[in-house]
Image (cartoon, coloured by chain):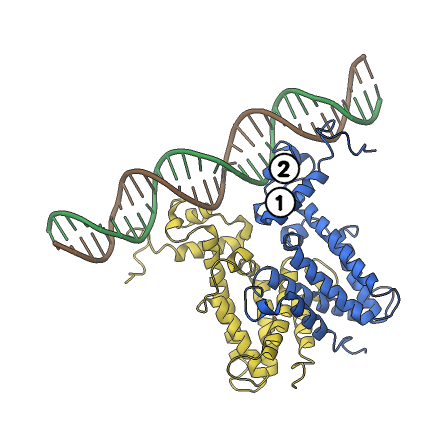
Chain colours: A blue, B yellow, C green, D brown
Amino acid sequence: MKSAKKEKKKAYHHGDLRRVLVEEAAKLASREGVESVSLRRVATAARVSPAAPYHHFKNKSDLLAAVADEGFRRLHGTMARTASGYGKGKENVEGRLQGLGLAYVRFAVRHPHFFRVMFRPEIARAAEPDPESWGQRAYFQLIRSIQEVMGEEGEPSDEVMREVLYAWCIVHGLSSLWVDGALSLEEPYASWGVEALAEYVTGRASVGKGGGKK
Amino acid sequence: MKSAKKEKKKAYHHGDLRRVLVEEAAKLASREGVESVSLRRVATAARVSPAAPYHHFKNKSDLLAAVADEGFRRLHGTMARTASGYGKGKENVEGRLQGLGLAYVRFAVRHPHFFRVMFRPEIARAAEPDPESWGQRAYFQLIRSIQEVMGEEGEPSDEVMREVLYAWCIVHGLSSLWVDGALSLEEPYASWGVEALAEYVTGRASVGKGGGKK
DNA sequence: GATTTCATCTTGACGGTGTTAAGATTAAAA
DNA sequence: TTTTAATCTTAACACCGTCAAGATGAAATC
């Protein structure tokens, strides 16, 4: 359907934009911050006129939403890799959950630019939640993990959803506060380092795990 | 020093700007969102030329930092009011801490625009933390409250700072996720409502309170 | 009171921004 | 080969943050 790549210079019509645009936008965001991503700069970086992106994205927010989705794809990836690192079955489900939490925080700290676009309100509120989106997939992954910890199958119970909420709040709170500078600029947290904070916080959360179960 | 208010129309030179600018910026942010706050619109709203704000603020970020400080002032206010609502002494310190958490979340949900500016990285990273700032004051308030719960005085111990971290992460995580639409657009959380979520999450956090103390 | 000083505000301009309309180019469909 | 439809460009619009230069007038000085 799409003859992917030609020789080198200019593609036939003009390459497979869209992918290139998302790539350049992400690159620019991670180099100079989300705030300084402009459609025109992205277009220029893709060697294309300022209005060209409008044939692939409704507007700037739509482009950023695509960047966010790419971010969620990567987050989903590291989470999946982490989970499978803890074995397949029900062995050490407890440790696996903490591992997921650590993976979440590490991702945020290592890719703050992605993390920031991913949770922009104008992105999340754009379209109704698409179950195919990487954001939703990562979300389902978390739900499934907690179901395993609590020994549950099928449709997630309210109890599970409460645990999901709790776990998500903790890792997201830590990530946000660190990335936004509230913790990373404050003593003693700055000297303790994120890794230690994440370990403490995820460990502390799972001592009473289950709420009433065990 | 400052004859505060004249009659009505135009002040002498031109009113006490700065305060008006911060006010208008906050008003605009809460009406249309932080993203659509522009120096020029704020200036216009204050009936002043586009370049006038530059005699009171270094740049746009500096203005937003002032808005953020105003936000922290209000947060500090509701937290203080909440705390004193739980009595003065060591009676019900436990409940007071949960009350503080609820106050935090409620503030974020009721004033999402403020909440968003308050934790913008370019704001936090602007100047070195000023202990006089309302942000720091609210922070110290939280530390003191947790010290009371743990029956400690003087310089806060590492144990206290860990508890501060934990409490802050939870309420900030919930606030962020809700305000940014990650929870408020997702079932079953949307139908449960923030209030219920906040109560569960803060309650769940304090069951094992103290880590090892009791 | 007259004069100087100095903070404040305005005017006007600069380059950069998101977005749109109208037209050119060219791959794919007919 | 002709038609169609997708893609990209050009040109323009209004708006943005920021700065330099000058006007204004309150407060300090004489």
Query: Residue A104, position in %: x, y?
Result: 71, 61
Q: Residue at x 46, y 48 (%)?
A: B39
Evaluate whether residue A139 shows in this view: yes
- Of residues B102 and A65, the one nearer the viewer is A65
Query: Residue A28, position in %: x, y?
Result: 62, 45
Q: Residue at x 52, y 68 (%)?
A: B75
| Picture quarter with the C terminus of chain B | bottom right
Q: Which residue is drawn at 82% across and 70% down?
A: A93
Binning the other alpha carbons within 10 Å of mark 1 as few (below 14), some (14 to 19) or many (20 upward) gives some
Evaluate whether residue B183 shows in this view: no
| Picture quarter with the N terminus of chain B | bottom left
Q: Residue A45 carries which label?
A: 2
Instruction: Pick whichever of labels 2 and 1 is earlier in the sequence.
Output: 1
| Amino acid, disc 2 | Ala
Whether B29 is drawn above or below C19: the answer is below
Residue identifier under label 1: A28
Instruction: Left or right? Give the position of B141 relative to A133.
Output: left
Whether A168 is drawn above or below B205: the answer is above
Q: How far apart are marks 2 and 1 (CA)?
A: 9 Å
Query: Residue A1, position in %: x, y?
Result: 83, 33
Marks 2 and 1 belong to one chain: yes
- Of residues D5 and A40, the one nearer the viewer is A40
Instruction: Left or right? Give the position of B55 relative to A108.
Output: left
| Amino acid, disc 1 | Leu
